[in-house]
């Protein structure tokens, strides 16, 4: 089993830093280096760098690519300008999630999709099955390394690394291309932490140069453990937790990433669906850590739902999480059953932390 | 991995320091490292009588939960209250400020069921292979 795990090109760099390695979506990935909480705080206060090369990159190009993507993506690419990116979903006929992704418009008829590692092959197959006309689809996952540099120092570090002043002009969900080749080097102002930051799609065989340089310039190496706590604090959904093939953007409260004015696979399913649940964010009164699958109860002890993700927030000093509960439930107080004890919690408006992303142009 | 020579150990990764008829209990350096950042600690009440290997607490880290077992039978004399606010003491100093429970030992002969430092070290090396 372990021998079949895939490794990123930075594997040796992680071992050198004494990372704790774990299997994740078929890859052997670093879960932490110095400790999850320290890494979370580094991103919130300074900067951190993550190896997320396990994520999938799928290139879609050809004269029919816009038409094709309009059909398979929930969000529109028609109005997306080149050098801008957009968050979107792949939905099945019922409107349920196949995956969530970011689509980057490289040029008029060339797009890069960044998808979850766990769904890469499923997504790729789905895209091939629905391809029509002049569309080429290429899986570039093993060509690209993906480094995510997040936190308030990320702009300074990225500018020094690539010696490009234009990096400062980028706003959230815009990107620039450093090497305009068939497989370009992309620096995009995106992330999964709620902080300002950049993701670097690096197509060469020596990503260790970038990794080591970022650390030398002050970035803390961060693992998937910190990434999970950061994204929960930011209330970003994760496939297999908040979103999966049983629910839709209606339950998940993500309809702002669905363009109901166009036709796409899943639209009819969404129109027919009457959601009975809603996704909520909650904090506990204690330091207990809510875990996926924990039951959620109403204040008078009736079961109303379940936890999809939970963690300890080092900023709030308490357990936080997300979960699905009955749509009808309108009270603020809930009880979460952690290891047999019902712990009082409060439903809060997401996110738990203020977003620090650099807003600007359209999304 | 730090395994002090003057302590006794369990296969569940608790340590105990015997001082007269009192035993101080905590979790080992190996255990805290395996768990990662500990964020929540729950301990038995003072005055409770516990049997050898009976549960005396729970620790939670960001990624895992672990039960704590008593290396010896006895009466709980004291619990480390500072861990409620500072569970990170267990990560920072598992054999010092991260101690968890003090017991009045009921049956000293039970100590023969515990591992000496070199045996614990061997056990951990086997387990982590």
Image (cartoon, coloured by chain):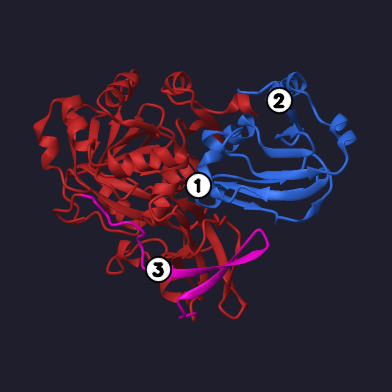
Chain colours: A red, B blue
Furthest toward the front, the residue is B20
- Tell whether position A119 is magenta: no
Q: Nearer the viewer, mark 2 or mark 3?
A: 2
Mark 3 is surrounded, within 10 Å at the Cα level, by few (under 14), some (14 to 19) or many (20 or more) other residues, namely some
Reading the image, the residue beneath label 3 is A348
User: Is any atom of residue A196 visible in this view?
Assistant: yes
Q: Chain of mark 1?
A: B
Reading the image, the residue beneath label 1 is B86
Q: Chain of mark 3?
A: A
Reading the image, the residue beneath label 2 is B124
Label at residue A87: none
Image label count: 3
- In the picture, measured across the screen, residue A175 lies left or right of residue B6, that is left
- Tell whether position A343 is magenta: yes
Q: Chain of mark 2?
A: B
Residue at image x 77%, y 56%?
B48
Looking at the picture, does residue A331 appear above or below residue A5?
below
Q: Which residues are magenta?
A: A329-357
Cα–Cα span, label 2 and label 3? 43 Å
Cα–Cα span, label 1 and label 2? 27 Å
Looking at the image, which is closer to me, A331 or A161? A331
- In the picture, measured across the screen, residue A240 lies left or right of residue A261, that is right
The image shows residue A212 at horizontal and vertical percentages of 32, 21
């Amino acid at each position: 089993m372990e021998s079949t795990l895939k490794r990123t090109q930075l594997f040796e760099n992680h071992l050198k830093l004494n990372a704790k390695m774990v299997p994740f979506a078929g890859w052997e990935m670093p879960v932490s280096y110095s400790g999850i909480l320290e890494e979370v705080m580094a991103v919130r206060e300074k900067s951190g760098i993550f190896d997320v090369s396990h994520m999938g990159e799928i290139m879609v190009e050809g004269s029919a690519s816009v038409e094709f993507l309009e059909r398979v993506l929930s969000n529109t690419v028609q109005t997306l300008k080149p050098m801008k990116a957009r968050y979107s979903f792949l939905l099945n006929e019922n409107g349920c999630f196949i995956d969530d992704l970011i689509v980057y418009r490289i040029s008029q008829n060339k797009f890069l999709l960044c998808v979850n590692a766990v769904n890469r092959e499923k997504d790729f197959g789905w895209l091939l099955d629905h391809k029509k006309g002049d569309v080429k689809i290429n899986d570039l996952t093993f060509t690209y390394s993906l480094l995510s540099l997040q936190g308030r120092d990320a702009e300074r570090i990225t500018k020094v690394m690539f010696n490009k002043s234009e990096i400062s002009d980028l706003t959230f969900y815009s990107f620039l291309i450093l090497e305009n080749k068939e497989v370009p080097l992309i620096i995009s102002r995106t992330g999964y932490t709620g902080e300002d930051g950049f993701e670097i799609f690096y197509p060469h065989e020596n990503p260790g140069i970038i990794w080591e340089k970022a650390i030398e310039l002050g970035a803390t190496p961060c693992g998937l453990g910190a990434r999970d706590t950061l994204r929960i604090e930011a209330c970003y959904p994760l496939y297999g937790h908040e979103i999966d093939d049983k629910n839709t953007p209606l339950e998940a409260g993500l309809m702002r990433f669905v363009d109901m004015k166009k036709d796409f696979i899943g639209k009819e399913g969404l129109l027919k669906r009457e959601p009975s649940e809603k996704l909520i964010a909650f904090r506990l009164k204690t330091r207990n850590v809510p875990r996926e699958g924990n039951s959620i109860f109403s204040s008078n002890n009736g079961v109303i739902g379940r936890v999809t993700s939970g963690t300890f927030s080092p900023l709030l000093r308490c357990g936080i999480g997300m979960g699905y509960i009955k749509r009808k439930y309108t009270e603020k107080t809930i009880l979460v059953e952690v290891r047999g004890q019902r712990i009082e919690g409060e439903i809060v408006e997401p996110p738990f932390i203020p977003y620090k992303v650099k807003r600007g142009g359209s999304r | 991995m730090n395994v002090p020579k003057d302590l006794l150990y369990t296969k569940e990764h608790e340590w105990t320091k015997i001082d007269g008829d009192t035993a101080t209990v905590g979790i080992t350096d190996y255990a805290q490292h395996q768990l990662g950042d500990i964020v929540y600690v729950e301990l038995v009440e003072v005055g409770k009588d516990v049997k050898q290997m009976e549960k005396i607490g729970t620790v939670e880290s960001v990624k895992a939960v672990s039960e704590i077992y008593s290396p010896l039978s006895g009466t709980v004399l004291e619990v480390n209250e500072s861990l409620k606010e500072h569970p990170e003491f267990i990560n920072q100093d598992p054999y010092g400020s991260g101690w968890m429970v003090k017991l009045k030992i009921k049956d000293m002969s039970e100590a023969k069921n515990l591992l000496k430092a070199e045996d614990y070290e061997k056990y951990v090396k086997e387990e982590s292979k």
